[in-house]
Image: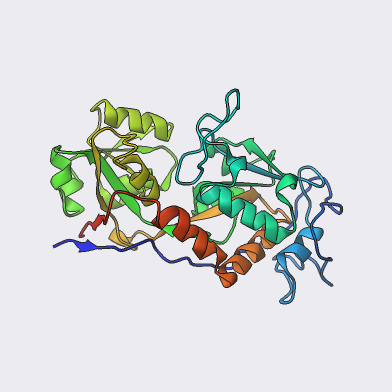
């Protein structure tokens, strides 16, 4: 029998060690609060116990002094970004400056904890595959469902988790794969995923199915709509959006099932904010996330944007 999951996976926060970077100094960032007695301390970049995120941000360095530059991919998909866009905008689907959608709301909440007002936040396009690549970044942090992996953490700083999430399978109603109830039932199907994502690794390493490899999520969706693959693996909220009866980005689709934490020896997928390797802002971001968790604001944003805004209903869980 299949078990059923109700709601989303609880948040988990783990301390991350960080250092400094070589960007322009941000002594006049406009962040509130004063620098702590030790600022970002030691080789690990650990803040002092009494230091707040706003204190920490006073001594952090930014791409542009006085501005918090945030990157995300384009198009910016719901439920992570909402509110649409205006004619002539560079944003193809949703403009992240609206503050609507889970990741837009989280980004502004983090910025607020760091001491930045909304007018001090600047959004720029940051293609997903560049966010965890080595090298200089044109943003202070990027937020776009960047799943943590040890390999990615070698090239960039990855913050503590701001959300833990299961993988889920989307398929067209009535096709054979929709009858699958276990992981073993999926092995003979071709399942699409975007290259370089944890979804792709999950298809190959945990499910053991033939992967449909696509450079972007949009191409993977198009392949499923064209009948070139049997299913699409993606994080649960995106799956709920794609199969929403009022959206149907994948035509006539259904969320076949989701995968429990630790499935097949895998780990729960958690997403992180990405920063340049050794960024002095990293411990400040972790402090901001801890403060948002402690106040209940992070959970409230998770509930608002990822639990309440779904029309798909309860999604079954695949057995091993």
Rendered residue at 70%/68% (across/down): 46
Quarter of the picture containing the N terminus is bottom left
Left or right: 207, with 121 as reference point? left
Left or right: 313, with 27 as reference point? left
Rendered residue at 60%/27% (across/down): 90
Residue closer to the observer: 227 or 152: 227
Q: Is residue 133 visible?
A: no
Residue closer to the observer: 120 or 151: 120
Rendered residue at 30%/61% (across/down): 260
Quarter of the picture containing the C terminus is bottom left
Vertically, is 160 above or below 36? Answer: above
Vertically, is 278 above or below 97? Answer: below
Residue 295 quadrant: bottom right
Q: Is residue 114 visible?
A: yes
In the image, residue 311 lies at what x, y percent?
Answer: 31, 49
In the image, residue 84 lies at what x, y percent?
Answer: 52, 35
Count of residue discs: 0
Residue closer to the observer: 29 or 196: 29
Q: Residue furthest right?
A: 28
In the image, residue 115 lies at what x, y percent?
Answer: 75, 58
Rendered residue at 25%/27% (across/down): 228
Q: Residue furthest bottom?
A: 49
Left or right: 137, with 31 as reference point? left
Residue 212 quadrant: top left
The scheme the figure's colours follow is rainbow
In the image, residue 157 lies at what x, y percent?
Answer: 62, 53
Left or right: 163, with 109 as reference point? left
């Amino acid at each position: 029998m299949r078990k059923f999951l109700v709601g989303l996976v609880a948040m988990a926060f783990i301390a991350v060690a960080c250092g400094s970077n070589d960007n322009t100094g941000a002594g006049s960032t406009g962040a509130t609060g004063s620098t702590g007695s030790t600022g970002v301390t030691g080789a690990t970049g650990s803040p002092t116990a009494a230091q707040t995120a706003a204190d920490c941000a006073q001594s952090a360095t930014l791409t542009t002094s006085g501005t918090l530059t945030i990157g995300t991919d384009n198009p910016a998909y719901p439920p992570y970004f909402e509110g649409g866009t205006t004619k002539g905008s560079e944003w193809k689907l949703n403009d992240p400056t609206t503050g609507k959608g889970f990741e837009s709301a989280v980004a502004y909440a983090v910025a607020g904890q760091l001491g930045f007002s909304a007018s001090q936040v600047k959004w720029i396009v940051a293609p997903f595959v560049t966010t965890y690549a080595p090298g200089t970044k044109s943003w202070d942090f990027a937020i776009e469902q960047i799943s943590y992996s040890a390999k990615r953490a070698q090239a960039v700083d990855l913050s503590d988790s701001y959300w833990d999430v299961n993988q889920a399978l989307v398929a067209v109603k009535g096709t054979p794969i929709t009858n699958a109830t276990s992981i073993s039932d999926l092995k003979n199907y071709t399942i699409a995923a975007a290259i370089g994502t944890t979804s792709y690794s999950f298809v190959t390493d945990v499910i053991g199915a033939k992967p449909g490899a696509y450079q972007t999520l949009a191409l993977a969706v198009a392949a499923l709509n064209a009948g070139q693959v049997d299913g699409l693996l993606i994080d649960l909220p995106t799956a709920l959006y794609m199969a929403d009866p009022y959206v149907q980005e994948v035509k006539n689709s259904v969320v076949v099932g989701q995968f429990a934490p630790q499935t097949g020896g895998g780990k729960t997928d958690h997403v992180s904010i990405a920063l340049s390797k050794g960024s002095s802002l990293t411990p400040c971001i972790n402090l901001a996330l801890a403060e948002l968790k402690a106040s209940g604001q992070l959970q409230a944003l998770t509930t608002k944007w990822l639990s309440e805004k779904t029309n798909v209903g309860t999604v079954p869980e695949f057995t091993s």
